[in-house]
Amino acid sequence: MSSPKDAPIHEKQLELADDISQEVQAEGVGREYELKCGLINRCFQEEIGFGIYQKQLFVLTGLGWLADNLWLQGLAVVLPQIQQEFNPKEVEYAVLAEFAGLIVGATLWGIMADVIGRKLSFNITLFIAGVFGLAAGGAPNFIGFSCLVAFMGFGVGGNLPVDGALYLEHIPQSHQWTLTLLSVWWALGQLVSSVIAWGFIAKFSCDSSIPAGQCPKSENMGWRYTLYMLGSLTLLMFVCRFFIFDMQESSKYLVAQGRDEEAIKVLAHIARRNGKTITLKLEDLQAISGEYPVANTKTTEKLQTTIRNVFSGLSLSHIRPLFSSKRLGVNTTLIIIIWGLIGLAYPLFNAYLPLYLAAQGSSDGSSDTYETYRNYTIISVLGVPGSFIACAVVDWTRKPRSSSGGGGFTIGGRKLSLAVSTMLTGVFLFLFTTSKTTDAVLGFSCASSLTQNAMYGVLYAYTPEVFPAPHRGTGDALCSALNRIGGFIAPLIKIATTPATGTVSANAANGPVFVSATLFLVAAILTMLLPIETAGRSAL
């Protein structure tokens, strides 16, 4: 029997039940979780808001995104010097090693986020990346360097699938657009790598005229100093996350695990940080599932539950719900394929851009090490506005073609923004292959850098939004893993179009870039076929 004071609780439940459509119910979550998630979303939107906690989380999550591209581009900028000092048979094997680590890291940490929570993965990934990134700077030979880079990739690979999910689950629906804005940190990662490399490599490197294998370590410390700096920055990010910020577990993850009491405590804590209070009570959540308040679980029991969840989570229990309906299954399949195509296309161009720039400069006699890294820095700077452009357009002009209402055709939103930016990236890369001068190469590289950052800004927002919280980490992990598998294949294509000496000419560069451009165009077409649009919708 419910008392009069329980009436508001049941009214909220009934109101939520009316608000949530059958369409959303079919997307991989149960009705009980759906209603609880609705209460949490309302709590964030109407009571907690977007305050100091979310702003600090935006910065710390952004640092994880920065670290991802910091190391992706960090390896790219040191490849010419690695090649000159160690003279490996194929310098592309270093990129192959990095992406092998990224594949394992993205898969493991993303799935673990759904099994043991977001918090542990959020904290430990940057520590692993920083330690092995620092060690790579002291590598005595190419094999040792590649092994250390693989372990670095294992750490940094878990950042994006975990960080995006964690941030999305701590913000109100009115501020979900800031998930797109996070991509500016990713763009800054390339810029930071470029500036550091420009400062160190241009000053402390062997002359480009010295044959590969004849460049002594003592005269080629620039790339080592670069990795030391990148590793130190990554460890500093870890310190900020682990020791300074009071990171809270995701309340949506907690209710998905049946830990309603802990979820309420998390929400109350975040509200206090924002100077607010919440009216949502434990009884509100338990009334939905018909449970009664229970005493705190003992630490040993929590540990046993965690261990059981780890092994049960390795099954398909978090994968099947991503294909629970035809519509969601099609969307999941397409977005995973899109991630894979972009994962192959992006490193085919960007992972070797310093080599391409140096080769193009050598072909017209205008390039040296300083100019190569200067141009790379310019390209990185002009990529940053792409993130702001993506943030401005993801919710723009999204309205039905007719005023009759209903769920008719819409213009704008995530899908169109993603398709246009991806298509433009492919077009600019095609133009890159036609470039005959250094200025043309620089111009089309800058244009593609801007559209690529816009593309990733939308992609990294759409992907976690389209997956429900109980399976979001796994969905993100599948996308990120296929993205990294594409990156793993990219060096093989590059090797196939590169002479056995490991050098690359301006003409040889056109092969992999042409493939990259084609893949971007295919990904743009598939984007338009996605059946689900997430703009204007609260994330479950």
Image (cartoon, grey):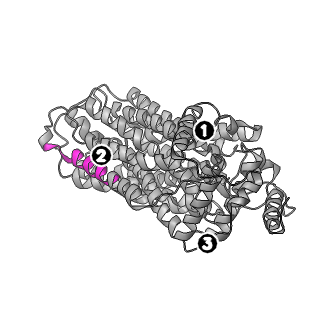
- The residue at 53%/51% (across/down) is 456
In the picture, residue 221 is in which quadrant? top left
Does 417 lie within the magenta span?
no
Looking at the rendering, in which quadrant would you find the N terminus? bottom right
Classed neighbour count for the residue bearing mark 3: other residues with Cα under 10 Å, few (<14), some (14–19), many (≥20):
some
Residue 244: x %, y % from top left? 39, 61
Q: Is residue 528 visible?
A: yes
- Report the residue marked by disc 2: 361
Find numbered disc 2 in the image and state the secondary structure of the residue it sits on.
helix
Q: Indicate whether 300 appears above or below 499.
A: below
The image shows residue 235 at horizontal and vertical percentages of 33, 52
Q: Please tell me the numbered disc located at residue 336.
A: 1
Can you say whether 452 is above or below 89 in the image?
A: below
Q: Look at 61% across and 49% down and name the residue there.
A: 253
Amino acid type, mark 1: Ile
Which region shows up in magenta? 219-234
Please state which of the two labelled residues, at mark 1 or mark 3, is closer to the viewer. 3
Q: Amino acid at mark 2?
A: Gly
| Numbered badge on residue 277 | 3
Residue 351 % position (x, y):
39, 41
Residue drawn at 39 percent across, 48 percent down: 126
Q: State the CA–CA distance, disc 2 to disc 3.
A: 61 Å
Q: Residue 413, image x and y in percent?
A: 67, 57
Which mark sits nearer the N-terminus, 1 or 3? 3
Near mark 2 (Cα within 10 A), the count class, few <14, some 14-19 or many ≥20, is many
Q: Residue furthest bottom?
A: 275
What is the C-alpha distance between the residues marked 1 and 2? 37 Å
Pair 1/2: label in front? 1
